Image: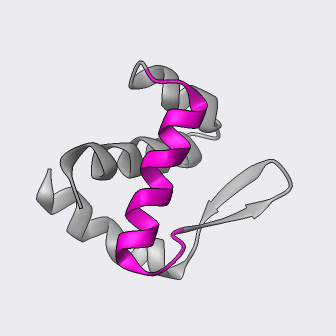
Amino acid sequence: MNFHDIEGFLAVVRAVEAGENLSDAADDLHLSQSALTRRVQHLENELGSKLFERHGRKLVLNSRGKAFLPHAQGMV
């Protein structure tokens, strides 16, 4: 787990909470959408659990993501 993966996760959470999408989160970090997706996937692989659920094109933080959020915020 590295800082960039956690930073990506938190950017996606902020975007989701603001009603934005993954592209907006990627723009905030000056990354491509695919690079941000890889960061989140890397974090999910390390944690052994998905952190978001997809509902069509919309991302939703799942229960594991909600549980991990305060830890991620504390690490940053």
**In the image, 41: left or right of 5?**
right
Q: Residue at x 29, y 52 (%)?
A: 6
Residue 37 drawn above or below residue 26: below
Residue segment shown in magenta: 31-51
**Percent x, y of residue 72:** 25, 61
Magenta highlight: main SS? helix
**In the image, 44: left or right of 59?**
left
* Total numbered labels: 0
Asked if the stretch drawn in magenta spans residue 56, the answer is: no
Q: Residue at x 14, y 61 (%)?
A: 74
Quadrant position of residue 29: top left
**Percent x, y of residue 24:** 57, 27
**In the image, 14: left or right of 37?**
left
Quadrant position of residue 54: bottom right
Q: Residue at x 75, y 51 (%)?
A: 58
Q: Nearer the viewer, residue 28 or 4?
A: 4
Residue at the left extreme of this rendering? 75
Quarter holding the N terminus is bottom left
Q: Nearer the viewer, residue 64 or 20?
A: 64
Asked if the stretch drawn in magenta spans residue 33, the answer is: yes
Quadrant position of residue 42: bottom left
**Percent x, y of residue 34:** 59, 35
